[in-house]
Image (cartoon, helix red, strand yellow):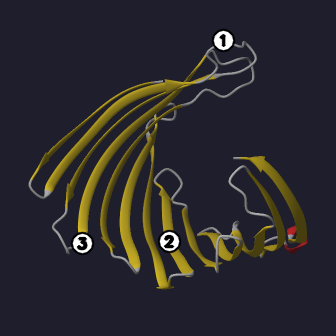
Amino acid sequence: MREVWGEWKTGWTTLRSAIGQQWNNVAGDATRSRLEQTYGRIGLAWKRPTWPEATLTYARNSLSSALDPLGITPQKNQNHTLEGALAYNSLRWNVRLASSYLLGSDLLHGGAETTARLQVFTAAFRPLNTVTIAPTLGYREEANSWSGLRITSPSASVTLQYRNNQQLLISAMGNYAGTRSSDGLIDTEQAGGKGILTWDLQPSQAWTTLVSFEAGYNRMANHVTPSADTEDISGVIRLVLAVL
């Protein structure tokens, strides 16, 4: 991996940029493709004391495969992404709203284009020193110019943490995600949750002993093929002994 980055700041305005390259399969394994990626991004941030921070970022990413073994489909893609965001941070709460537009091209198939729009809202609220609530809402809409297919993907999640002291931590998480296509061939929903209780049995400056109890539930509903529905319930007990 190689990367060069820079930052320039004046007053309330900050300009950041970076370019880089990375790849895998550095040993040249003949049974695997080598994926080579080059990227560049430039971002402008404006922040005034007590005001929300506004950012605008452009990124370009190129991905291509090399050393493709027989039977492996080569890849050559190019993506452009533009994101605008507003964020505000305070002692009791943080919020961020971001909107992105992505244009992708498959250079091995006549430059077939895919566009995607993504909106994400994240927040963290601390009504008490011992409690943190962090919700996330997202919505993605993707369209393929070569097929006319449109795919929408709403999502939501929330995390709750309660820490009474250095010994006890209780956390609970819930999530939902759906995916639907305009041709009706994709229509799935997934919902789940997890609860964790962690207890430090014997606090010490030399070592720590943690025990945690975890319980989780996940359900995936396939409205096109109901026989593919899945549901699982899990429970885990963990014991951690570590030297500090």
Question: Which quadrant holds residue 61?
Answer: top left
SS at mark 3 in the image:
loop
Q: Which residue is mark 1?
A: 28
- Residue 203 drawn above or below residue 131: above
User: Which is closer to the viewer, label 2 or label 3?
Assistant: 3
For the point 50% across and 71% down, the residue is: 139
- Disc 3 crowd rating (10 Å Cα; few below 14, some 14-19, many 20+) is some
**For the residue labelled by badge 2, is the local secondary structure a helix, a strand or a loop?**
strand
Q: Position of residue 203 (x, y in %)?
A: 73, 62
Which callout, 2 or 3, points at the residue further toward the start of the chain?
A: 3
Give me the residue at 64% from left, 80% from top: 164
Q: Mark 1 or 2 closer to N-term?
A: 1
Q: Earlier in the sequence, mark 1 or mark 3?
A: 1
Q: Position of residue 156 (x, y in %)?
A: 58, 76
Q: Position of residue 6 (x, y in %)?
A: 25, 35
Q: Residues within 10 Å of mark 1 (few under 14, many from 20)?
A: few
* Residue lying farthest to the front in this orientation: 205
Residue 114 vertical placement versus 107 (above, below): below
Q: Nearer the viewer, residue 129 or 55?
A: 129
Q: Amino acid at mark 1?
A: Gly
Q: Residue at x 40, y 81 (%)?
A: 92
Q: Amino acid at mark 2?
A: Tyr
Side of 7 where 142 appears, left or right = right
Q: Residues within 10 Å of mark 2 (few under 14, many from 20)?
A: some
In the image: residue 218, left or right of residue 20: right
Asked whether, in this view, residue 23 is left or right of residue 176, the answer is left
User: Which residue in the protein does label 2 denote?
Assistant: 139
